[in-house]
């Protein structure tokens, strides 16, 4: 989060352990947990990113000097960063842009279909449905296809919107067959569970002796092995 003393901060979810990561003017931020990066928009015309744990490895993507970067959101699956650029002169419009996460060759693209007369702030991306949502200070909440193949559609009108977030929890699936609150893949990779048959399912969640797959371990399984392997 950012506070009045300018910068990017982190804290525990109970509000304790507040720590300043980045000393910078900060408007909006987003996290990329996969690459352990925090992204933020900063004054006057730049995007920043750094290690989200300790604030090291700071990098900046400098943009057109006539624009101010405002909202930003990360799509790590497709390796894009989406952001809003606000034109600092009349008619004071803003547009949606995206860049690749490779900032050495950022490939900045306008995906807004020439939107004008709008002041966009925060952003959120629905990766599965390739949809970008934005808070519009003047009109409400808008959405458009994230690849720029559609014009923005006003879906919640007549509100002055500063922020937007998506609740996608119903789509999430976490494979935790032994209910130890650790992903099965992590149990296996860290050696907490065996996976003798290499099917990415911890062996304690399967009945390995049920070789004929009738959900029962009985003499039929032994007979199956004997018939199959001649032992």
Image (spheres, rainbow, N blue to C red):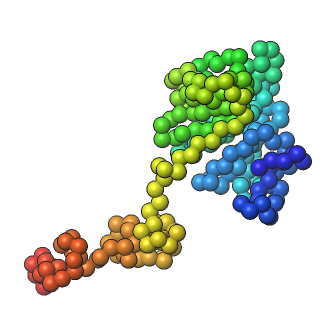
Rendering quarter of residue 54:
bottom right
Q: Residue at x 35, y 69 (%)?
A: 198
Residue 68 locus on image (x, y percent):
78, 29
Near-viewer residue (135 or 71): 135
Rendering quarter of residue 214:
bottom left
**Seen from this angle, which residue lies furthest right?**
5
Q: Is residue 107 visible?
A: no
Residue 33 locus on image (x, y percent):
62, 54
Quadrant occupied by the C terminus: bottom left
Above/below status of 88 relative to 134:
above
Above/below status of 189 relative to 223:
above
Near-viewer residue (167 or 224): 167
Q: Residue at x 88, y 45 (%)?
A: 4
**Seen from this angle, which residue lies furthest front?**
158
Residue 97 locus on image (x, y percent):
64, 29
Near-viewer residue (54 or 93): 93
Q: Residue at x 48, y 77 (%)?
A: 192
Give the total of numbered labels: 0
Residue 23 locus on image (x, y percent):
86, 49
Above/below status of 144 relative to 186:
above
Near-viewer residue (48 or 220): 220
In the rendered view, does 67 fall on the left or right side of 123? Answer: right
In the rendered view, does 146 fall on the left or right side of 3? Answer: left
């Amino acid at each position: 989060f950012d506070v009045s003393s300018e910068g990017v901060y982190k804290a525990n979810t109970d509000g304790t352990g507040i720590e300043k990561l980045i000393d910078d003017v900060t408007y909006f931020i987003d996290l990329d947990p996969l690459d352990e990066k925090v992204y933020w928009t900063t004054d006057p015309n730049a995007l920043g990113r750094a290690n989200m744990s300790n604030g090291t490895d700071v990098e900046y993507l400098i943009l057109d000097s006539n624009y101010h970067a405002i909202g930003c959101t990360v799509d790590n699956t497709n390796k894009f960063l989406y952001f809003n650029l606000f034109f600092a002169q009349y008619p004071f419009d803003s547009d949606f842009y995206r860049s690749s996460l490779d900032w050495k060759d950022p490939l900045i693209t306008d995906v807004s279909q020439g939107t004008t007369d709008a002041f966009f702030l925060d952003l959120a991306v629905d990766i599965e449905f390739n949809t970008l949502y934005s808070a519009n200070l003047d009109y409400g909440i808008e959405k458009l296809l994230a690849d720029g193949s559609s014009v923005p559609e006003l879906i919640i009108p007549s509100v002055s919107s500063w922020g937007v977030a998506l609740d996608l929890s119903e789509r999430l699936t976490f494979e935790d067959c032994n209910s130890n609150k650790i992903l099965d893949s992590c149990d296996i990779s860290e050696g907490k569970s065996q996976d003798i048959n290499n099917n990415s399912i911890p062996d304690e969640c399967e009945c390995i002796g049920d070789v004929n797959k009738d959900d029962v371990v009985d003499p039929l399984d032994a007979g199956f092995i004997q018939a199959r392997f001649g032992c």
